[in-house]
Amino acid sequence: MAGNAVGLGNFLRFPVQAAQNGGGTFMIPYFVSFLLLGIPLMWVEWTIGRYGGRHGHGTVPGMFDELGDRKRKWAKYLGVLGIVMPLIVFIYYTYVVSWMLGFSFFSLTGGYFGLGDFDQVAQYLYSYQDIFNTSSHGGWVAIGFFLATIVFLYWVLSRGISGGIEKLALIGMPILFLFAFVLMIRVLTLPEAAGTPAEGLNFIWNPEWTSLSDAKVWLAAAGQMFFTLSLGMGTIHTYSSYLREKDDVTLTGLSTAATNEFAEVVLGGTIAIPAAVTFFGVAGATAIAEGGSYDLGIVAMGVVFQGLPGGETWGQLTGFLWFFLLFIAGITSAVALSSPAIAFLQEEYEHTRKQAVLKVMALSVALGTLHVVFYHRQFLDVWDYWAGTFGLVIFATVEIVLFSYVFGIDRGWKEMHVGADLRVPRIYRFVIKWVTPIFLFVLLGWWLVTEAVPTLLMRDVEDAPIAYDPETIVYRWFSRIVMLGLLALGLYMIHQAWARKAIAAETEPVPPDSG
Amino acid sequence: MEGSSITPFAWVFMVVSMGSVTALTAYCYYRILIVSRKARAAERPGGSAGAPDS
C-alpha cells in the first residue's frame, strides 16, 4: 500500500502546491492537516474498507450502505464519490504519468540536453504538453506516449495487481528512495545561479504568518494531504476490503502515512523547490508552479541532470532512471485509482475482470484524449482542482460523519482495534469524533464564504486557484460539464445496481421452513 | 550552500519537521519488524509469541 501512496504526488505535485501557496506558509496547514486529517482518516478508511469487505462489499457505495445498516437509502448514493472521484483522478493522472514515460525517453535520447537554461527546458516541456505548439515536438508525441501508457496499464490491470506490478513496485520503490536521496544531496550542493539552494529551503520552511488566514492555502494543504495519502478517493477502501477480519489496520495505516510523508517532506520537498529557486529565483519558481500542477519538478530536474558531474551520458542515464522510476511509481498509483471503478463493475454488474478493465480503459482513452488535446486550455487543472482537491475534501467530510455519527464512534473505535498491532492513542477517538469533522466543515465553510462564488464563476480574483483567462473559459466549462456527467452516470449506475439487487431478492426462492 | 540565507525559524521548523517524520517512519517499521518476528516465532512448531531464540 505504501508503494501505491508514494507517487507523483510526492515529487511533482507537492512542490507545485507548496510553491503556489507561499512555501513555508503552506507547510503549517500541511502538518496540521497531517495530524488532524491525514492520520485519523487513514485509520477510518482502512477500518471502513475491512468492515465492508467482511460484508461482501469491495467499493464505497456498498460500504456506506453497510455503515448505515442498510436502513438509510441515501447512504449508498453518497458513495458515488468513492467511484467517480478516483476515476476522474485516474483519467488525468494517467496523462501525467505518460509524461514520465516521455521524459525518460527524452533523457535517454538526450532530447532536452543542451538546453541548459531553465526557461528553455520549460519551453521544451510546454511544447510536449501542448500538441499545437510544435516548437520542439510534433503533436503526435504526447498522444503517442499517452496511448503507450494506456496500453501498459491495460496489460498490468488485466494480469491483476499481484501479477507483476506489485513485484516491480517492491524493487522499484527502494531504488526510487535511494535515488531521490542522491538527487537531494546533489541539489543541496548546486552552485549559486539566480538563487541558492539555501534560499529554496528558506522559501519552503519560512512561513509568512499573515497569509495563514487565506482559505485557499488551507484547502490546498488539505487537498494535497488527501491526494498524496490517496485519502478521500475510495482506493484504500477497495484495497482494505481484501483484508481478513483479524488483519491489522492501525499499524498498517500509520506506516503507509509515515512512509509517504517521508518521501514527500524529506525527499520531495528538498529536491524540486531548492533546485528551481537556485536556477530561477523564488519569483521564477513560483511563476513556473503557477503554469501547471506538475511542471516544476520536471523542469527543475531536467536542468539538474544536465549539470551532473560525469558527462552527458551519465546525466542521460540518471535522467532516464529517475523519470522511469517515477513512471513506475505513477503506474502503481494509477492501478489503485482505477480499482474502485473496476471492482464496482465486477461486483454490481457481474463483469469479468477483463470486461471491467476494458470498459474503464476505453473511457479513459476517450476522456484522457480531451486532456491531451485541451491541456493548454487548463482542462486538466480544472479536474485537478475540483476532483483532485475539492472533491476529496467533500468525500472525506461525508465519510467521517458517516463513520462517527451514523455507524457510531463506539462501534467504529472497537472495529478499528480488531486484530490491531498498534493501540491508537485515546485522544484520537476525540479527534475522529469532533476535531476532524469540525476541521473539515470549517474548511469548506471558509472556502464557500471567501472563494466559492469567484471560483465557480471564474471571476478574475487575485490568487484565484485557477487563473482567469477569457480565451479558455468555454473549455473550462466544458471540462466541468464532463466531470458532472461522470458523476450523474455514477449515480445512475448505483441506482440501477440496487434496483437489480432488489428484484433479485424478490425473485429468490424462499427456503423451506425447517421447523 | 549559504547557511545565512535561511532564517533561524526556518532552520528549526525544517529540522523539527523532517526529524519528526523520519522518527515516525522509523518507529512504524520497528513495530512492523517486532510484529513479524513474533508472528514467525508463533508459527514455528512448538513456538510461542515472544519466546527467546534458542
Image: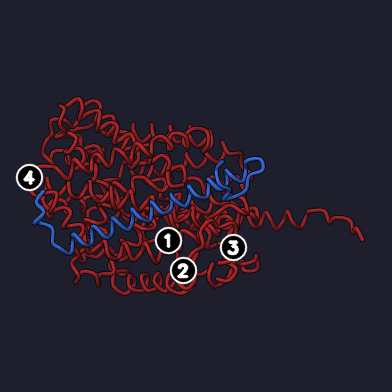
Q: Secondary structure at mark 4?
A: loop
Q: Residue at x 8, y 56 (%)?
A: B4
Q: Label 1 lies in what chain? A: A
Q: Which residue is mark 2?
A: A428
> Disc 2 marks which amino acid?
Tyr
Residue A39 marker: 1
Residues A50 and A146: in front is: A50
Residue A193 marker: 4
Q: CA distance from mark 4 to mark 1?
A: 39 Å
Instruction: Verify CB contact (< 8 Å) between mark 2 and mark 4.
Output: no
Q: CA distance from mark 4 to mark 3?
A: 55 Å
In this structure image, what is the colour of chain B? blue
Local packing at callout 1 (Cα closer than 10 Å; few below 14, some 14-19, many 20+) is many
- Left or right of A492, for residue A270: left
Q: Which is more foreground, mark 2 or mark 4? A: 2
Q: Residue at x 20, y 65 (%)?
A: A207
Instruction: Verify CB contact (< 8 Å) between mark 3 and mark 1.
Output: no
